[in-house]
Image (spheres, rainbow, N blue to C red):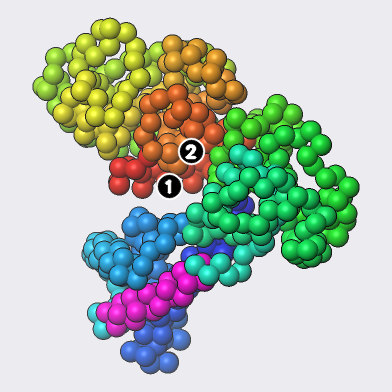
Amino acid sequence: MPYILNKYYPSRDILFFLGEGALISFIILMSSFMFRGGEAFFGEFYVFLSKAITVTIVFQLCLYFFDLYDLRQDLNLPDTATRLTQAFGVGCIILAVFYYISPWITIATSIFWSSYLVICITLLGYRFAYHKILRQKLFVQGIVVIGTGKLAQDIATELEERHNAMYRIVAFVGEDSGNKYNIPVVPSLEEMKSLLSVETIERIIVAPDDRRGATPVRTLLNCKIRGTNIEQGVSFYERITGKILVERVDPSWIIFSDGFVLSRLRYFLKRLMDILLAAPLLLCSLPVLILSAIIIKVESPGPIFYLQERVGLNGKEFRIIKFRSMCNDAEKNGAVWAVENDTRITKFGRFIRKVRIDELPQLWNVLQGEMSLVGPRPERQVFVDDLVNDIPYYNMRHGVKPGVTGWAQVCYPYGATKKDALRKLEYDLFYIKNNSLALDLLVIFYTVKTVLFGKGR
């Protein structure tokens, strides 16, 4: 899990998260010390520590669900204070339930509310200071990008428009075609000395759109020997965005990459996790399943479940099970792309789609081994045949089992066009390349937020 966190989050943001958690726990412990006295406090230190950690976990989870750890966005102080109050309000309700169920973890009223007030003030100051650091681009690594074309501009967009970016482009190397961020452009890497000493460059990103003679190999070798990190543009983009630029990747990059490997052990552990999570989840959701089935049957004529052929592992078709959310004759004129605000969807169907209840029967597909909890969403053969012709590497999605949820579903909003299919494939390929149990758990964690707040697809 630490590797996954470092791969998908800037280390600076991880330290911010850990620092905030330490602050919350420390304030509660100090308040306990002041109200209970030194002898009583140290005599039951581990009891006070467990109580402080409980509050910290609940509060930080609430901060996460209220998007206060999405540091890509630049929030002002009033917005931060409002969300903080809302998050802690929900946190207090959750803690009240915990305290009712397990009274032994209850914190004395005087300790809790005095700590609460100090925590709110301290966290506002802590976040204000951190966002000021981000705005002023402090503690970032300066990089040079070789190339000024589409790939280089895509990298610049990601870095310049992301509030918490760990990198700052100091110059482009190539033809000066202009850029909206007013970043300096020099004709060659050798001429960088007039702008910045080559010895001080920490990282060079090689991202020319035309590779023929565009890469200064000798100069790059000299920089490499001096300790400068050299990275391919596509690989760098993958690392900072969590997706692979399908249109700019050549087959050799995929063939010689470290990823796209699913070992027998990894396959076994993934299957074991699917069974251990899907079986109890299906059992716990039985009341919701039964109630939904009754409403669907009463609302509109037709079957309760919707069975449809989808393309699965290695291109083999299987029948996916979903609650019917459309009118019974929705596809009487043939298969069409689903669209947002689709008139074919019933009233209750719109609701179960929004909260993902329509997907719950797919847990049976998971138990049967046709699907996994996490993986690329399965598509219909008629659409696959069309997309394979227009989108490079689309068939690679079928190298792993399709999933009930996936990296693309938690990272990309609802979409039902070929362009959306391309964008989602960028995330699917990233998942296939970096597949691991830790990434699966991260996707499941994100899915909970997606379901609760209706984001993604």
Please provide percent x and percent y for residue 93. 23, 63
Q: Residues within 10 Å of mark 1 (few under 14, many from 20)?
A: few
In terms of secondary structure, what is the magenta stretch mainly? helix
Disc 2 element:
helix
Q: Is residue 18 visible?
A: no
Q: Residue at image x 34%, y 71%?
A: 77
Residue at image point 21% right, 20% down? 344
Residue 153 falls in image quadrant: top right
Expressed as whole percent of the image width and height from the top left, the position of residue 109 reads 24, 79
In front here: 321 or 415? Answer: 415
Residue 170 visible here: yes
Q: Label 2 sits on what residue type?
A: Trp
Q: Which residue is mark 1?
A: 445
The span picked out in magenta is 113-134
Residue extending farthest top: 333
Residue visible at 60% across and 30% down? 247
Mark-to-mark CA distance, 2 and 1: 11 Å
Report whether 142 appears left or right of 398. right
Seen in the picture, residue 279 relative to 59 is either above or below; the reply is above
